[in-house]
Image: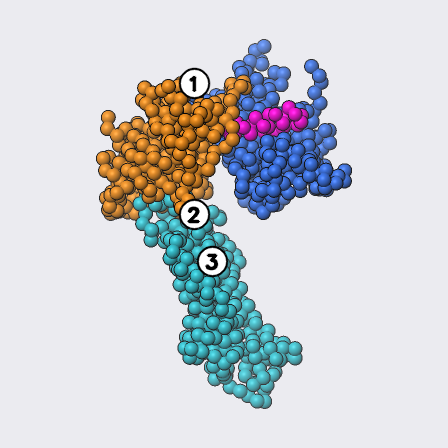
Chain colours: A blue, B cyan, C orange
Amino acid sequence: MEEKKTLLEIKDLEVIYQTDEATVHAVNGINFSLNEKETIGLVGETGAGKTTTALTILRLLPERTGRIKGGQVLFRGENLLDKSVPEMRRVRGAEISIIFQDPMTALNPALTVGDQVLESLEIHNTAGKSKQELNARVDELFNLVGIPAERKAEYPHQFSGGMKQRIVIAIALACAPQLLIADEPTTALDVTIQAQVLKLMENLKEELGTSMIIITHDLGVVAETCDKVAIMYAGEIVEAGTVEDIFNGKEHHPYTVGLFNAIPNLDEKEERLRPIDGLMPDPANLPQGCKFGPRCPHFTEACKAQTPYIYEEKEHRIMCNLFKKEAADE
Amino acid sequence: MSKDKEILKTEQSKVKKKSRAQETWRRFKKNKLAVFGMILFFIILLITILADVIVSYDVSVAQVASERLQGPSSSHWFGTDNYGRDLFARIVHGARNSLLVGFGSVIIGVTLGGLLGAVCGYLGGRFDAIVMRILDSIMCIPSAMLALAIVAALGTSLWNVLMAMTISNVPRYCRIIRSSVLGVTGQTYIEAAHSCGTPDFQIILRHVLPNAIGPIIVESTMAVGSAIISAAGISFVGMGIQPPAPEWGAMLNEAKTYMTMYPYMVLFPGLAIGFTALSMNLMGDGLRDALDPKLKN
Amino acid sequence: MSNLVETVDLKKYFTVGKNRYLHAVDGVNLEIPEGKTLGVVGESGCGKSTLGRVVMGLLPATSGQINFDGQDIVSCSKKEFKQVRRKVQMIFQDPYSSLDPRMSIYELIAEPLIMNKVYKDKKEVLKRVQNLMDTVGLAERYINSYPHELDGGRRQRIGVARALALNPKFIVCDEPVSALDVSIQAQILNLLMDMQRDLGLTYMFITHNLAVVKHISDVIMVMYLGQCVEIAPADELFANPKHPYTQALLDAILKPVIGSSKERKLIRGEVTSPIDPPAGCRFAGRCEHCRPECTGRDIRLVDVGNEHKVACVLAGS
């Protein structure tokens, strides 16, 4: 197996939102790394800190409230958190780009879609390419995402939701970034269209070799597209590993188990669903020790006392005291 | 779910029902600027009511030729104008006319325009189209000119000025309320209210107006100041409040000629209008926020 | 068992210009037996939400019948409709926009009670509100809270409490869990199923989530561009989908299992315009089995046994 080069490495990242009333601990010391040509899925429910992580990588946190408390975001060995604002602007779009959830609002309704793709090319046109070359690239991008190039003179409202998401992807890919962050790319789309868009992203990954971070709450999307998975809960990665570790592995964090159980199973009939008890903790007022503790069926006093034990087996990491005993036994 | 029920049993905490007015007042109090605005407003109101106690009306109209254009001094706190009238007395006594025109036209205008706008926005369709076209044609006429025309037709009196200004302002308020009502009627909670059998009129009263009221509060508090000024315009062409009766806008207008030499002549009526507008603005902003439970605490 | 709700050739057209009509619901016949759940699935724009609103009486039907408990509510008088209205309620998709942000939880749950003048005494209203909050699992301390202070799951419980307030027989659930996180979604689905068991409710459950619809429904109806293309008992539909669209829809489900769908068939293109569609199968343009006989005439639902009906020329042949 060829040696994989690390593209992105996040170390002990901590992000808070500071408002007058409260300090919201959105991301609390997360670590993960992503190799070239790999896709990682960040999975979690609302408020788990997935989107905050993505915004931090691009340094797009809301200026007035968002604060990066600590940690590093190493992109090809360089810490993005140390970069100046103009330097960062060159990274965005050209080397790392992002796709947002809602294609309906991500496009400017007053510009033709062709112009919007062209715009992102012009901004990062450091090579001084001619207008013609750029236009040729626009056509190329439209073909890439499966939209006839003739339609580039049309406006966003003339496209359906799935088509708009394709255009958003074309814009994101315009400068051939090495890393693409997709924040819930298919949540707003219908099932059959979602399947089409995921297929497209899969093909693009193979063709262009772009690394991806896919943010989603849908385990089905992850199973379909990702090589690695990180399950987030209350700003922490409670379990991480390869997609096989998460979906086929034996050992799991209780939260991961809960997530899988809560989805209605298509293959067998069950009378009642098994939801996770309780609610996500308030990120302004997180519990001591294990953040999942209050909702966990295996909760003990030890979980409350300190940060949980980290179980590790190859790439599979689980942050839970349940595995501490086993480790001691061996 | 079982957990929720446990919580229910263990936490039979105080379920006190506070009325909406109490709740609003509690939130309003927390906004220092709004409270300042309210105090300022009460002071202005107090001066208006106690005008005769503070200084006699005669002083405000008495023309003393020997004391023309004097700067502020201990005998004339705000100085005197070009007819030798005491400006302090004129401001104190002018308050009644100015506030009446200012508040009166805004309050009546907002109520009429607001109701009309709410009904138009909520019902839509043909009724909305007809009413809005009529209002649009009124809006085509500059409001000062319209007001003048109305006063000219009805005759000169304070009440007619008030009515003229109300009519010329209704279309604007109507438009503002209508657009914010349109935004609210699209919300699902209106549909939800329909689905549980709430009648239309109740829906407007309980759901639409409370949610659409924000912009109109801001707009109307801003309008008080400008209403005083435009009433002055009518006075200026001789159709409003008749001289020598004092009125802030008219004072400002008269002082224009002397502005470079005797700046205090514009300063004091200007400040009077400014403080009134400021007090309304601060209060209005505070009220809007206090009415919105989303901005609680 | 008798049917609580029935529609006969129900149509809802919206005018979108001179003599141009959007066929949102185009000739739907459905039957929901008392105490059962009908799941309605389809993609956005297929008319499932419109169908729910027409059955609810929130939108007037263009033609056809809606029989509720044997009474046609399309042609009945306003007064009669008001009586029916109390027995038919709705739970909305978005617990964020379906609750008036300026009302407290008490005011929200009390609204249907006060507006329908159920109780004379205010104390009784309060008692009923507390009772409803208990039923849906909302702690009483939230009674003076405002919707924005609660999370999505609790807000949706308010929506459920409002729908239950007038002791309805039939509830239209319009995507009641699609705005919620998975763990909360399961809580609400369990609540809805408990309510059905305890109160004998009948549901029409509208959703695009196939896993959810299979879990909660007795019978599932698949809609495409305003028409019912297939209707069958839940297990039968998933085991034996007949219509090419249903097959594609089931095929597109993303299962949380690795490699479950590597060789999935994708349907081409996107939903066509619902404005004045030509006669014939509306799925024909995207269908891989499309034949000449698919166009030109309307395709009727054919019974293929096991209470399974399909509108496709392939069926039954």
Badge 3: few (under 14), some or many (20 or more) residues near its Cα, within 10 Å?
many
Mark 3: which secondary structure? helix
* Residue A283 x/y as whole percent: 53, 35
Q: Is residue C72 above or below residue C235?
A: below
* Residue A241 x/y as whole percent: 59, 20
Query: Which of the image's four quarters has the N terminus of chain B?
Result: top left
Q: CA distance from mark 3 to mark 1?
A: 55 Å
- The answer to whether B175 appears left or right of C87 in the picture is right
At 34% across and 45% down in the image, what residue appears? B194
**Magenta part of the chain:** A192-214
**Which amino acid lies under the numbered mark 1 shown in the image of this protein?**
Asp
Q: Are the residues under marks 3 and 1 on the same chain?
A: no
Residue designated by label 3: B176
At 38% across and 21% down in the image, what residue appears? C315
The image's mark for residue C17 is 2
* Front disc: 3 or 2: 2
In the figure, residue B162 lies in which quadrant? bottom left
Residue designated by label 1: A267
